[in-house]
Amino acid sequence: MTAAPTDGADHHLLLVLRHAKSSWKTPGLADHDRPLAPRGVRAAAALQHHFTDLEIVPDLVLCSSATRAVETWKGVAGAFPPATAVAVEDELYGANDDHLLGRLCLVPESVGSVLLIGHNPGVEDLCSGLVGSGDPVLQARLETKFPTGALATFFVPVPWDELDWGGAELIGFVVPRNLEW
């Protein structure tokens, strides 16, 4: 991943993480309540190491209230200071790309970086729609598949309330299978 450009005052960093692999072992369990599968727990641990290596600390974490999303956050949280601001929001569960974009536009301008943890197809559609520029290889990988545990990183060159489709630069894309476990 390359570092985000630093000139100007209205630059932000957006990290979009699809929750890690969830379990289907409990018949009749509501979708919202499904926990991480063992593979998901391992992926979250690998992502925690990845976040530590990146040395990026989000100012705000926006996390779906679904159990698997919250457990994904707990799995990566060790990479960040304990005082990191976290908003677990019911509205992010099942949110489509337009809703996710709208939520990001409500982020206060004082917040420099956001980690959004959510679900497909919303997060994949959001990421595909935000790409306006960036490494063509990363773009192709993002467009090919956005599996559980995938993390897309964007440079946002405008204030949050001006973020729009095609308005971000894709500067990173990783999936758990490409990380050392």
Image: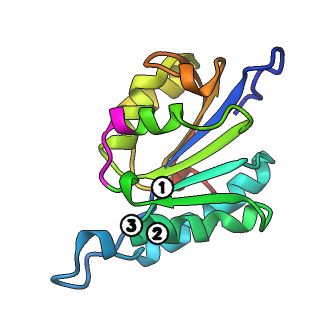
Question: Residue 73 location, x and y as percent?
Answer: 57, 64
Q: Which residue is mark 3?
A: 66
Q: In the image, what residue occupies the spot 77% across and 29% down?
A: 3
Number of residues whose C-alpha sits closer than 10 Å to that of mark 3, classed few (under 14), some (14–19) or many (20 or more): many
Distance (Cα) linking label 2 and label 3: 14 Å
In the structure shown, which secondary structural element does the residue marked by tag 1 occupy? Answer: loop
Quadrant containing the N terminus is: top right
- First-in-chain label (2 vs 3): 2
Q: In the image, what residue occupies the spot 48% across and 55% down?
A: 149
Number of residues whose C-alpha sits closer than 10 Å to that of mark 1, classed few (under 14), some (14–19) or many (20 or more): many
Mark seen at residue 40? 2
- Seen from the viewer's position, the closer of residues 140 and 80 is 80
Q: Is residue 53 visible?
A: yes
In the image, what residue type sits under mark 1?
Gly
Q: Horizontally, is 181 left or right of 118 in the view?
A: right
In the image, what residue type sits under mark 2?
Gly
**In the rendered view, would you say 113 is above or below 4?**
below
- First-in-chain label (1 vs 3): 3
Q: In the image, what residue occupies the spot 57% across and 58% down?
A: 87
Q: Which residue is mark 1?
A: 149
Q: Is residue 181 visible?
A: no
Task: Identify the magenta region.
Answer: 94-99
In the image, what residue type sits under mark 3?
Ala
Tag 2 near tag 1, CB within 8 Å: yes
